[in-house]
């Protein structure tokens, strides 16, 4: 086992950072939604400014028209602990990296920030705790376990039973704007788990920039003023 762990240290992938990419979005999403909404009332847009009606609909709770627009995101470098939470939102199309078809002998992993916090919060005089190194060692041990069972003839679908929730995954999701608003409402909340809250906030930033009239209220609730200003500058034309 010691020799195997020594070899693994050279091969073991490091902790990686999460990356969120907007893959696709309904073109002219605000215009599509407002035109659909005006069908309900048989009204016409006055002038060229889109968004006034949408703002009223969002405030009144008339959210069914938001289902006419979609967005697709690719999320990399997240843990399976996070994706297990995300896929509970069932009104989405989901495509996720498979541990059945993908060999995980060199899996990447996510280290919870609370591991580092343990070291910072130790009382003075206590023995120094190197939580991050301990966590990395645990990941190496699990990697060795996975490789051991693969060497004994187990297929990926069974060897994966020893893998941790920290194991990195990649997932693509597509959802309409109404469902995405719901996700932001519950997952950007301060009581949400830190990783999915981070994912939700990054997606909210992107969609606020692309369709501000639809996501402005949530941005104002969950983003800082500096973040809002930065987004407006980034997406200004």
Image (spheres, rainbow, N blue to C red):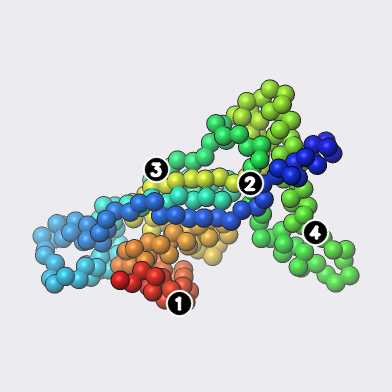
Q: Is residue 198 left or right of residue 150?
A: left
Q: Contact (CB < 8 A) between labels 3 and 4?
A: no
The residue labelled by disc 2 is 108
How many angstroms separate mark 4 from mark 1 (CA)? Answer: 36 Å
Q: Is residue 29 visible?
A: yes
The residue labelled by disc 3 is 93
SS state under label 3: strand
Q: Which mark is residue 189?
A: none
Position of the N terminus by quadrant: top right
Q: Is residue 149 above or below residue 82?
A: above
Q: Is residue 206 left or right of residue 58?
A: right
How many angstroms separate mark 4 from mark 2 (CA)? Answer: 20 Å
Looking at the rendered image, the disc whose residue lies closer to the viewer, 4 or 2, is 2
Along the polypeptide, which appears first: circle 1 or circle 3? 3
> Which residue occupies the foreground of this view, 211 or 18?
18
Along the polypeptide, which appears first: circle 3 or circle 4? 3
Q: Is residue 85 left or right of residue 39?
A: right
Q: What residue is drawn where x is 45% and y is 77%?
A: 225
Q: In the rendered image, which quarter is residue 92 located in?
A: top left
- The extreme top residue here reads 153
How many angstroms separate mark 3 from mark 4 (CA)? Answer: 41 Å
Q: What residue is drawn where x is 52% and y is 50%?
A: 76
The residue labelled by disc 1 is 225
Q: Is residue 140 visible?
A: no
Q: Contact (CB < 8 A) between labels 4 and 2?
A: no
């Amino acid at each position: 086992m010691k020799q195997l762990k020594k070899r693994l240290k050279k091969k073991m992938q490091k902790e990686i950072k999460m990356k969120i990419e907007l893959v696709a979005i309904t073109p002219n999403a605000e215009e599509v939604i407002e035109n659909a909404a005006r069908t309900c009332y048989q009204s016409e847009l006055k002038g060229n400014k889109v968004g006034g009606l949408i703002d009223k609909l969002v405030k009144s709770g008339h959210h069914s028209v938001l289902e006419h627009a979609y967005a697709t995101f690719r999320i990399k470098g997240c843990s399976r602990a996070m994706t297990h939470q995300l896929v509970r939102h069932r009104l989405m199309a989901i495509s996720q990296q498979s541990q059945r078809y993908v060999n995980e002998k060199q899996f990447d992993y996510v280290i919870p920030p609370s591991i580092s916090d343990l070291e910072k919060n130790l009382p003075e005089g206590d023995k120094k705790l190197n939580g991050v190194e301990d966590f990395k060692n645990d990941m190496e041990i699990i990697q060795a376990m996975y490789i051991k069972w693969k060497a004994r003839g187990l297929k990926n679908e069974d060897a994966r039973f020893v893998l941790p929730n920290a194991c990195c995954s990649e997932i693509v999701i597509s959802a309409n704007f109404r469902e995405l608003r719901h996700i932001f409402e519950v997952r950007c909340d301060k009581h949400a788990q830190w990783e999915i809250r981070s994912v939700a906030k990054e997606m909210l930033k992107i969609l606020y920039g692309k369709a501000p009239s639809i996501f402005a209220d949530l941005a104002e609730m969950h983003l800082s003023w500096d973040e809002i200003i930065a987004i407006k500058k980034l997406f200004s034309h």
